[in-house]
Amino acid sequence: MRVGLVLEQCLAPVPGGTGRYSREIARALARRAPAGSAVAGATAWHRELLRIEGVPSFRLVLPRRALIASWERGIGPGIGGDLVHALTPLAPPRRRTPLVVTVHDAVPWTHPETLTARGVRWHRRAIERAARSADRIVVPTHAVADELARHVQLDDRVRVVGHGVSADLRVPEDADARAATMHLPDRYLLTAATLEPRKGLSVLLEQLAAPAAPDIPLLVAGQAGWGDLDLPSEARRLGLADRVRILGRVPDADLAVLMARATALVVPSRAEGFGLPMLEAMSLGTAVVTSADPALVEVAGGTTLVAADHELAGALRTVVDDDLLRARLGAAGRDRATAFTWDAAADALWVVYAEIASSRA
């Protein structure tokens, strides 16, 4: 079987978690391909050619905006292969070739205020098209499957396939030198996310300014997204200017050092489909504090400290002050993270592809 992957998100201006997913699952699908099977990736026409280990990639004839517009209208270039898997809702129209679409969350319906109005409209239309025409819909958690079913007709085509931890996210041998270069303090909180409203970073800053919060720095790793979220200004307004550092997007080796040495990772998201940074920190033995988002709770499986917005300051104080609690959360999280690997996710997807092939035989 030849599987064509839509990998456009890998070259998006802000790839985010879905870009990371697309790259990692493509690599794993290539590694775990059954005998006689292979994958290839397609993107819009960019100056650069996407390069992913083991995944030959090609550029379609249209640039990004034109490609999106054509696919929305049910026209435009196809991907080729025996099956197409769109790794985000940006998918070609289904013609004769079977189509699988990954839908990462139900945010356009559950939290539309955290997206642009245009983004809400586009994602709803794209997911609704997938629900009408795709042979299978892949989602990362049962929480997403349950929520999507309230808004679109999915019947028995949904398959839950989790994520994994990148092999690139390992603490490097030069960790001490990297920590020194980044001027890491002895104790700090870390959050790793695209800087946009959905990630709950404004709530985090407000809670850090509360009297109950621990008096240690917050480091923020991630690219700016949409929404004009000005964290430095917000930190100054709240009297936190000397405690909040914005690091921007960091390479995986630095991210591994940041996560492994953090006192705790904080994930205050309004809505998630899976919570990949949480899983990555858990795999490194770092204690994690999260919101009560259903997908985060599902993936963590009881190994994180869950706090409502108004409880976050106290929860952070507890995890910072209690060495035994941090050790327990870190050990439990590390064990839990072993249940999620990209190879296991790829194996599950190859089973999905085989299901479709056998149903058409």
Image: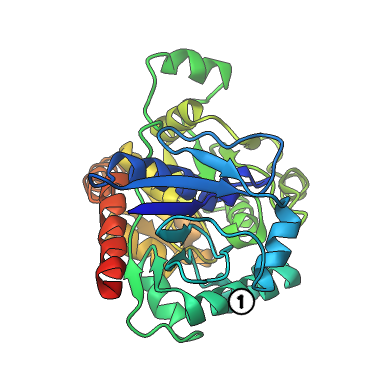
- Point out residue 165 in the picture as x, y percentages from the top left corner: 35, 42
Whether residue 29 sits left or right of residue 175 in the image: it is left
Report the residue at 49% width, 58% height from top.
312
Q: Is residue 17 visible?
A: yes
Q: Which residue is mark 1?
A: 124
Q: Is residue 113 visible?
A: no
* Residue 249 drawn above or below residue 39: above
Report the residue at 40% width, 66% height from top.
139
Point out the image quarter for the C terminus: bottom left
The image quarter in which residue 71 lies: bottom right
Which of 4/258 is in front?
A: 4
* Residue 170 drawn above or below residue 111: above
Point out the image quarter for the N terminus: bottom left
The image quarter in which residue 11 lies: top right
Report the residue at 45% width, 45% height from top.
40
- Point out residue 315 in the picture as x, y percentages from the top left corner: 43, 55
The type of residue carrying mark 1 is: Arg
Which of 211/181 is in front?
A: 181
